[in-house]
Image: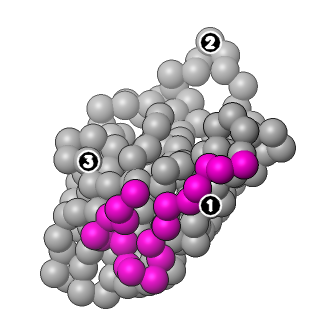
Amino acid sequence: MRASSFIPHMFRILERSAEGLRGDYSAAMAVPDVIPIKHDPGYHTDTIGRCRDGQFFGSVTGVYPKDYKVGPDWQRQMRWYAVLHSFDVEGFHSGSKIWLAGTNRQGARDATQRAEAKLRQWLDDVPDRTYGDVAVRPFQVEVDEIVFGLVVERRRGRRNWAELYPQELGFGPPWDGLYST
């Protein structure tokens, strides 16, 4: 397996032999210290990249309030946030801007447009911004009782992975930067 060129050389994942392991040997792979994330234009990771001070991950995301149980008013409960996470060149989290744009109750179209405008404003202020792949370390922040971040998930009997919250993008073996939703 060849390591991706966008991952700093000291964090590249080396190929491991499956000799002696049974079943899906990807379950035995540890979560790397630095997790690669591929730029996917026009989709979930279209506003990620590098800048003068390191790396960034921007998004607009809809999320329900903490502990919300789906009911007849489920559509009205969605909250829309503009999010911009910043990282240094080694992938350490250096800050987050998280802004509540509104809820579906106030109008989904208006809330998402406000969130998109705020994200564009923040991205315009990122010095020497270039969209592309990133490699970042797990982190988390909490706003409005909602977790925002890249969180390592470990569950007995299952492979380990990293989940980007609240977007619910999952990253796992072979740790090539691709995600599942």
Asked if residue 22 can be seen in this view, the reply is: yes
Name the residue that disc number 2 marks. 72
Most distant residue in the top direction: 72
Point 57% across, 66% down: residue: 32
The verdict on residue 107 being magenta is no
Residue 31: which numbered mark, if any?
1
Point 66% across, 20% down: residue: 70
Q: Position of residue 65 (x, y in %)?
A: 64, 40
Q: Is residue 103 left or right of residue 114?
A: right
Q: Are marks 3 and 1 in contact (CB under 8 Å)?
A: no
For marks 3 and 1, the one nearer the N-term is 1
In this picture, which residue range is highlighted in magenta?
1-20
Amino acid type at image mark 3: Asp
Point 51% across, 25% down: residue: 76
Mark 3 residue crowding within 10 angstroms, few (<14) / some (14–19) / many (20+):
some
Q: Position of residue 69 (x, y in %)?
A: 72, 25
Name the residue that disc number 3 marks. 40
- Cα separation, mark 1 vs mark 2, equals 39 Å
Amino acid type at image mark 2: Pro
